[in-house]
Image (cartoon, rainbow, N blue to C red):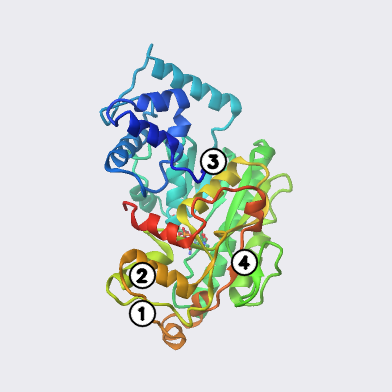
Amino acid sequence: MVGEERPAEVKTRKERGCGGWVEAVGGRKGVGKVCRRLGEGWEGLSKGEKELKRAVRGCVKAGKGCSRLERGKCKMYPFGSFTWQAWFINRLIICWLGTEMTVSVTGATGFIGRRLVQRLHADNHRVRVLTRSRSKAQVIFPVKDFPGIVIAEEPEWKDCIQGSNAVVNLAGMPISTRWSPEIKKEIKDSRIRVTSKVTIKIFSATALASPNMINFPFAFYKCSGSSETRVFDEQSPSGNDYLAEVCREWEASALRVNMNVRLALIRIGVVLGKDGGALAKMIPLFMMFAGGPLGSGRQWFSWIHLDDIVNLIYEALTNPSYKGVINGTAPNPVRLGEMCDQLGSVLGRPSWLPVPDFALKAVLGEGATVVLDGQKVVPARAKELGFPFRYPYVKDALRAIMSQES
Ligand SMILES: NC(=O)c1ccc[n+]([C@@H]2O[C@H](COP(=O)([O-])OP(=O)(O)OC[C@H]3O[C@@H](n4cnc5c(N)ncnc54)[C@H](OP(=O)(O)O)[C@@H]3O)[C@@H](O)[C@H]2O)c1
């Protein structure tokens, strides 16, 4: 899917000039190829290439497909043109191969979910957003940009799942808050509650839909205990702390799903992206010259670029080999101190103001363990499966993120 190389289509278009040649790419190589990378970063693209990408995105968002772009504007050529024929053939192939999916996503309005939905929508898959709040989801996915997306509140979830090929379950109360007993209960309960609802609905849905067509990727926190020296992979035993307990119970509720459903349990590390997660909190501090490592800085930081986790989930949706537990972390975890140094260097700011353990505990309470107790997690299974990480090194990931448009 996504390789190390710079998108070939973009290069081709640049060589030919960004004005009127996109149809050659969208037409001959297929709509999917052009659109597939739209949800990814902007790093390394020239001004002209960015303009082109924006135009293609606009075209896709307008629901017109990528049949033809002229001078940066999308145009449809309904009959007779080579481009239209190529587009039509491409659509037929997609239908014949059955690669067009209907995917239901819980937590779609969140940091990871939003990017996943953009990506699926850009690739012409049908998306169903399972949310607690239709009005919130409608703001995030306006009809003009996401035509055809179904937004469903809980009473409609069953119908959505029933007609889906796959469910991606990302919902859960954020953990990066000060933990009180009530919050801890909700962090766990919210995940198990949504997961149980989804699995129950899959139970009733599979009687009607074709069970082999249902994939079920999940998002999880890493499961094993913390250590400065040990390396954790998918085979490592679960830890004894609160988060490990949340993970165990979360996974257990997912495993209750029908035996004939392909279940991928993706244990996600700290996701790096500009518009959410840990990095969005760190960047302003660094920009104010107040950045530095949290705690000793020696704890391991198992991270993954937002594009890579979205690609991994996407791959799990489409590739039947992706099942069971799969760590969603980059192949080269770093110590938190190194991550902060790299972030400082990318931002042109010093990483000089360490936040001591006691200050973090004062602010986050027990929740401070999330950042203070690191783990060196490796994606053994994803590597075995040959998943092509686009950002294996944190420095490249940070550079790419900082050069991205929001
Ligand atoms: N971001 C990371 O670095 C990271 C790392 C490891 C694991 N994960 C896991 O990956 C999943 C997605 O992460 P994210 O960063 O995209 O999360 P997020 O931005 O916090 O979004 C999670 C979504 O879950 C739903 N939600 C929030 N509180 C809920 C509650 N109390 N009960 C039920 N649903 C609730 C919301 O969707 P609606 O309002 O539309 O229902 C929300 O948009 C989460 O389960 C998270 O634990 C994330």
Secondary element at tag 1? loop
Residue annotated with mark 1: 352
Whether residue 52 sits left or right of residue 224 in the image: it is left
Quadrant in which the N terminus appears: top right
Q: Circle 3: is it few (<14), some (14-19), or many (20+) Cα within 10 Å? A: few
Going from N to C along the chain, the mark reached first, 3 or 4, is 3
Q: 286 and 92: which one is in front?
A: 286
For the residues labelled 2 and 1, the Cα–Cα distance comes to 9 Å
Q: Are marks 2 and 4 in contact (CB under 8 Å)?
A: no
212 vs 332, left or right, is right
Q: Are marks 1 and 4 in contact (CB under 8 Å)?
A: no
Query: Can residue 312 be seen here?
Result: yes
Q: Is ligand 1 less than 8 Å from the beta carbon at label 1?
A: no
Which mark is nearer the camera, 1 or 3?
A: 1
> Mark 3 and mark 2: span between their CA atoms?
32 Å
Q: Is residue 380 left or right of residue 112?
A: right
- Left or right, 404 with reference to 110: left
Q: Position of residue 93 (x, y in %)?
A: 55, 24
Q: Which residue is mark 4?
A: 247
* Residue furthest right in the image: 259
| Image quadrant assignment for residue 75 | top left
Q: CA distance from mark 1 to mark 3?
A: 39 Å
Crowding around mark 4 (Cα neighbors within 10 Å: few <14, some 14 to 19, many 20+) is many
Between residue 197 and residue 279, name the one nearer to us: 279
Estimate the spatial distance between the alpha carbons at disc 2 and disc 4, rounded to whole Å.
32 Å
Judge whether residue 281 can be spotted in this image: no
- Amino acid, disc 1: Trp
- Which residue is labeled 3 in the image? 1
